[in-house]
């Protein structure tokens, strides 16, 4: 047993040795990190004795909530039976087969095959390899360019960040790799500029057609998008957007890829975000909700169009990871999906929690700081503005969001800030009483933030 340490000791060791992802190491060393020690249901416990309502499901992943003993027991059983074997070179394991078959059943009808990975980023890299391999097998190897969107998020590997449109990532020495192009995001609040949401949605989608024509249709391999952009700020496209994207990919014969890492497994009140919008993707990338974050696992659903080319035209697909189809991760993912089905969590999101959350969340629109409230089912966003009429953003952008997030945590609520957009994505198990608690805490947080901004001369 290690000697008991105080919170301060842990924080000092953390600052001395641990480089955190997507964090300003210098800043967290000054402020001290929040040490999370346990969790149950939708609540987190920290070492300072705080209890937080986790409005973000960890990082958009803990769909079934924390503390599911059943998942721990499945993991222990599988570890005792077979802790690891790979799926290279004609080998396989039972949990991997069972999970693949279950995913084929749960996903839209064009999907019968899955390639397993260890994360969302690996799923994106795998998808890129598959898309290029597909066009090679189709005798059109010059079709290399994959089109994504500015401010889209597709993970943090070099290929994922190149496909993603996070310019602040590109600026850190990561000029996108060749073979990727970007179009404008369907972010009406920021870019509609007087047009109706529907008109703007069509215009944003038609940028895809312009880009295809600019690159030459014979060189374009695929279009990739999140049904709803998550990390970019819960950006919900106008209803006109996805049907027009589908028309364009069909017209030019390019592959459509739905990045379902956040939207998959019930977040939109449907099993997959593409079902919410009625698109027919050729490929879906997945992770996060697949295991509710209990163990790291991702996957790529490969639709019949691409799978048939791989299977019929043959040849080894020279790609894979040591931990692809890890049997313990597969067993836990399968048990997680069983919980989602048994407890009816997708229907709960569609019929109960989602509508209630949206109704309650919308009441925040009257707050002086809130320029827009938006959401779909178990996703929500608030745009913080300096003034609603005429619309003025805070300058510089992002500082007010950060303050609001810190106030939320002081109020016992985890919300995330992206620029000055506050976002939530609570566990699918959240009850209506807990939604009341979430929204009350969010309102209190907005009130406190408003007072602070007045006190400090922001308003
Ligand atoms: C989180 C995320 C990824 C990357 O997943 P990791 O498991 O963090 O590598 C990819 N795409 C989307 C849409 C995501 O939200």
Image: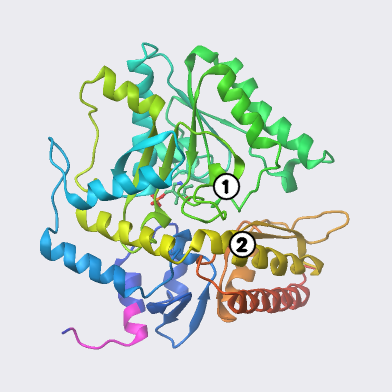
- Which of the 4 quarters of the picture holds residue 13? bottom left
Dot 2: within a 10 Å radius of its alpha carbon, few (fewer than 14), some, or many (20 or more) residues? few
Mark 2 or mark 1, which has the lower sequence index? 1
Who is closer to the viewer here, 452 or 405?
A: 405
Residue 339 x, y percent position in the rendering: 39, 64
Q: Is residue 7 magenta?
A: yes
Who is closer to the viewer here, 453 or 154?
A: 154
Residue 28 x, y percent position in the rendering: 45, 69
Residue for point 42% across, 47% down:
106
Q: Quadrant of the N terminus?
A: bottom left
**Secondary structure state at the residue bearing disc 2:** helix
Residue 156 x, y percent position in the rendering: 41, 46
Residue for point 38% across, 26% down:
306
Q: What's the coloring here?
A: rainbow
User: Is residue 357 shown left or right of residue 215?
Assistant: right
Q: Which residue is mark 1?
A: 229
Residue for point 30% across, 71% down:
70
- Which of the 4 quarters of the picture holds residue 278? top right
User: Ligand 1 near label 1 (Cβ, under 8 Å)?
Assistant: yes
Q: From this view, report whether residue 408 is shown above or below residue 329.
A: below
Q: Is residue 156 visible?
A: no
Q: Quadrant of the C terminus?
A: bottom right
Q: Which mark is residue 425?
A: none
Q: Which residue is mark 2?
A: 351
Q: Residues at badges 2 and 1 in contact (C-beta under 8 Å)?
A: no
- Which of the 4 quarters of the picture holds residue 202? top right
Q: Is residue 68 magenta?
A: no
User: Is residue 268 shown left or right of residue 302?
Assistant: right
Q: Which residues are magenta?
A: 2-10
């Amino acid at each position: 047993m290690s000697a008991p340490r105080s919170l301060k000791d842990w924080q000092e060791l953390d600052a001395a040795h641990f480089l955190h992802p997507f964090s300003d190491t210098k800043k967290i060393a000054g402020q001290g990190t929040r040490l999370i020690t346990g969790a149950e249901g939708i609540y987190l416990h920290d070492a300072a004795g705080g209890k937080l309502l986790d409005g973000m499901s960890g990082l958009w992943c803990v769909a079934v909530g924390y503390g599911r003993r059943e998942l721990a027991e499945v993991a222990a059983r599988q570890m005792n039976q077979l802790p690891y074997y790979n799926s290279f070179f004609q080998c396989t394991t039972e949990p991997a087969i069972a999970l693949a078959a279950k995913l084929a059943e749960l996903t839209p009808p064009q999907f019968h095959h899955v390639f397993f990975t260890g994360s969302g980023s690996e799923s994106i890299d795998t998808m890129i390899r598959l898309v290029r391999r597909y066009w090679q097998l189709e005798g059109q190897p010059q079709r290399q360019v994959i089109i994504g969107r500015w401010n889209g998020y597709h993970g943090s590997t070099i290929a994922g960040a190149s496909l993603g449109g996070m310019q602040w990532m590109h600026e850190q020495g990561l000029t996108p790799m060749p073979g990727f192009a970007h179009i404008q995001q369907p972010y009406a609040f920021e870019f509609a500029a007087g047009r109706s949401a529907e008109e703007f949605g069509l215009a944003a989608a038609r940028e895809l057609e312009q880009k295809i024509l600019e690159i030459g249709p014979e060189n374009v391999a695929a279009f990739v998008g999140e049904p709803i952009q998550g990390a970019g700020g819960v950006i919900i496209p106008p209803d006109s957007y996805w049907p027009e994207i589908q028309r364009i990919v069909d017209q030019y014969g390019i592959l459509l890829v739905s990045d379902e890492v956040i939207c998959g497994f019930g977040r939109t009140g449907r099993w997959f975000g593409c079902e919410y919008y009625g698109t027919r993707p050729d490929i879906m990338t997945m992770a996060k909700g697949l295991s509710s974050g209990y163990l790291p696992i991702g996957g790529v659903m490969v639709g019949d169009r691409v799978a048939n080319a791989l299977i019929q035209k043959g040849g080894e697909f020279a790609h894979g990871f040591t931990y692809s189809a890890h049997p313990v991760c597969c067993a836990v993912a399968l048990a997680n999906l069983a919980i989602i089905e048994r407890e009816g969590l997708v229907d709960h999101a569609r019929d109960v929690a989602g509508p209630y959350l949206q109704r309650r969340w919308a009441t925040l629109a009257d707050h002086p700081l809130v320029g827009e409230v938006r959401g779909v089912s178990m996703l929500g966003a608030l745009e913080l503005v300096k003034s609603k009429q005429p619309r003025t953003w805070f300058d510089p952008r992002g500082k007010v969001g950060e303050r609001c997030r810190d106030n939320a945590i002081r109020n016992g609520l985890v919300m995330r800030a992206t620029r000055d957009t506050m976002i939530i994505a609570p566990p699918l198990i959240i009850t209506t009483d807990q939604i009341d608690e979430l929204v009350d805490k969010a309102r209190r947080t907005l009130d406190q933030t408003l007072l602070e901004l007045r006190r400090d001369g922001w308003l």
